[in-house]
Amino acid sequence: MVVTPAVGVPQEGVCAVARPVRLEAVLIGHDRRIALNPPAVLSCSTAAAIAAWIREDLVPLADATGSPLVSITVADSYSCRPRNRLAGAKPSAHGNGLAFDLGAMELADKRILTMQSDSLTPAARQLLKASACERFGTVLGQGSDGYHEDHLHVDLIPRRPGRAICQWTLPRDSKG
């Protein structure tokens, strides 16, 4: 991973982040890097989990389209706010650096893969959902709650075994 310390992020209080970092890129081998735009501000452990997901699952998924993944748009990372930005709601996992919102993925041939378009095949959507739900305690995508229609939310909120949340309604032809 390419990380730098995240300056100005509280390390105590409601929106505290343990070991905050800015995840700027994920290194793939010696000569390839996947840029994150803008860099994601996360806890160090969440940054490591996101980097592993990108390296082990998103890169092969994109490569299977015939063009390598070059960058990822970060829809959101650290943000001290309530869930879904609703006043009075519980604090969001974003406020503790435990959440990452995957926006678009740009390929070397300039194609853009998004959650909303047909740019992701049904098989790719199914693989993406399966990988996210296997790795993270919370996965929220299209059809989950109306707040995650254009991006994929993943987080590492600690949950009891068997209590993970995986809510992403795939199109019927995705068999998910």
Image: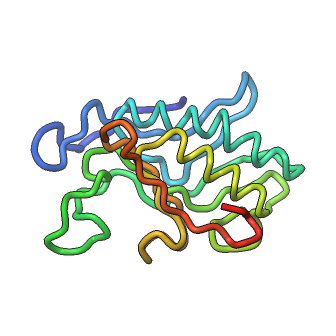
How many numbered marks, from 0 up?
Answer: 0
Residue furthest to the right? 66
**Residue closest to the eye, 10 or 149:** 149
For residue 102, above or below residue 60: below
Q: Which quadrant: the C terminus?
A: bottom right
**Residue closest to the eye, 3 or 171:** 171
What residue appears at the point 57 percent right and 38 percent down from the top-left corner?
Answer: 25
Horizontal relation, residue 132 to residue 30: left or right: left
Residue 14 % position (x, y): 13, 49
What colour scheme governs how the chains and residues are painted in the rendered image of this protein?
rainbow
Horizontal relation, residue 157 to residue 127: left or right: left
Residue 130 % position (x, y): 62, 48
Residue 105 % position (x, y): 67, 56
Residue 53 % position (x, y): 58, 38
Horizontal relation, residue 127 to residue 132: left or right: right
What residue appears at the point 25 percent right and 33 percent down from the top-left corner?
Answer: 18
Residue furthest to the front? 162
Q: Which quadrant: the N terminus?
A: top right
